[in-house]
Amino acid sequence: MNSEGAGERGDAPDTAGGPPDDASHPAAPAEPSLDPGGETASANGAQVSVELPATVEAPAAIAPPAPVECWRCRRATRAGLLCEWCGAALLGAAPGAARSVGRAEDRGVMRVLASYAVLLAISAAVGLIASATESTEDVQSLFDVNRATLILEGLWLFVILVSTRFIPRPAAVPRPAAALRTATWLAALPLLALLLAANVGYHTLLRTYLQAEWIEDGLRIETPTPVVLLVAFLTICVEPGVVEEWFFRFVALGHLRGAMGTGGAVLVSSIMFGLAHIYSPLSIPILTVVGLGFGLVRVATGSLLLPMLLHTLHNAAVLWMELRKCAEN
Amino acid sequence: MSTLPQGASGLPSLGGELSSLAQEARKKQLRVASGIFIAVGILTILANAVLLAMFDSQVDTLLSAELAKQGLRLEDTDPGAHEKARATVARTGYLIFGGAIAIGVVYLVLAALVSRKPVVMTVTGLVLYIASMAIFGLLDPTTLLRGLIIKLLIILVMAKAVSAALAYERAGKSVTA
């Protein structure tokens, strides 16, 4: 372990650099039996007290360490202090360490849920302020739907950035086989088309049932100047595509996966994603399905890039359709 | 404990006993969570079924209130447009209350499955409860303050159940490993 430990081991007989193995030398009465932890042992009838570190590393030249599975990223890595892929401490072999690792994972899940509750509270508060000010025309001009969206997204970004300080980094999703990753990238556009079709179809059905032209307060752009469109694109497409994917598909899915497995984590993070859109409650079922699609893509590629792209493109398509509706009206 | 576990030193069996006691305590917490899910589920179904049954008679009152807010009277509006608006409001109400009843049913399903998949069910239950509080608070802000202490207690119990479920499943995994 260290030079001091080696010095103490100098009292012990030379075992050709091999690991001290009491079980392999049961009949060696002349040698003091080495008892880690400073227990007294008998040597030639005399009591000898030897203090040794609890674990003694095997020199790599004699017995190369077998690869172990990292508890966090689940990849095979050389046994050592840290995982060579994700840098996680490889202390899982010791029961106490495993317990503390498990507790750290539990803390991660609880903090994800706490952050999620804060996000919902913010959405509810902004929604309440928006609807409260909607009735008075003079205030409506100051706090309309678009401003509410801007403020909500800004607050979400702030909370998610702050939460990164308190939520530990989740375990990496294992990288799937190259064939699956390639197939997912190739199927991305058809999948996006499918999700969009489901979204549009669901809202068409809803409109038909409700006999309403508009399902909810959507976008209201009276004069679509380039600057307004750019701001709308950034706040409605890019920012949610990056920030929401980061929170739901990286932080939440990562922590939940450690606690409930990949399938459960994808499902629960999708439910969280759908329910986060509380300002359009009638759209929650279809948004949960869309979230499920993004979650599956995240797991199938092992990367956040494709879900982020798909989310941004999905929102851009919805924005374009809303703009067309605005132009028609 | 009136009797100590038997064993050469007693310590290993005592450890096993303690660990099974801890698992029992977690199981008890999960049973409490299951009871909460059943209670919340039944209450949600009953309350929203009553609201749904009463809603049809309230639609006209709601529409008149909305018109009054805009400085209009019922007689001033086009009958066709009024009828369409009435249908839209009524159907939106049916969807919202129907959705709430569906959430109540989901709670009952979560209660039934909590012993099989503790973490998934407790986390889903907690997420659903907080989100439905926020959604119904957004639709009607007075619901946020109604029974606030009981709601906070339910959230606390559910959060404890999530924590117990995490420890329970982890301990189960370490036994099977």
Image: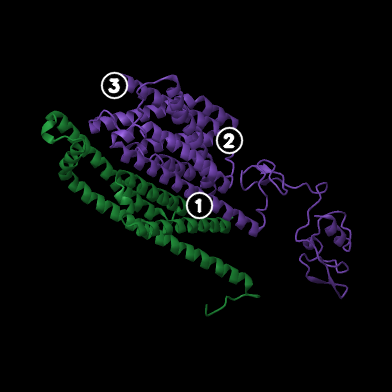
Report the residue marked by disc 2: A176
Q: CA distance from mark 2 to mark 3?
A: 47 Å
- Numbered label attached to residue A110: 1
B53 up-or-down from A177: above or below: below
What amino acid type is highlighted by mark number 2?
Pro
Judged left or right of residue B125, residue B147 is left
Q: Does residue B72 appear in the picture of this structure?
A: yes
Q: Nearer the viewer, mark 2 or mark 3?
A: 3
Q: Position of residue A166 (x, y in %)?
A: 56, 48
> Which residue occupies the foreground of this view, A186 or B149?
B149
Q: CA distance from mark 1 to mark 3?
A: 46 Å
Disc 1 + disc 3, Cβ < 8 Å: no
Q: Position of residue B148 (x, y in %)?
A: 35, 56
Report the residue marked by disc 3: A329
Mark 3 chain: A
Q: Position of residue B13 (x, y in %)?
A: 60, 71
Q: Look at the image and give the colour of chain B.
A: green
Check the picture and name the quadrant holding the C terminus of chain B: bottom right
Q: Position of residue A226 (x, y in %)?
A: 44, 19
Q: Secondary structure at mark 3?
A: loop
> Which mark sits nearer the N-terminus, 2 or 1?
1
Q: Secondary structure at mark 2?
A: loop
Q: Are marks 2 and 1 on the same chain?
A: yes
Q: Secondary structure at mark 1?
A: helix
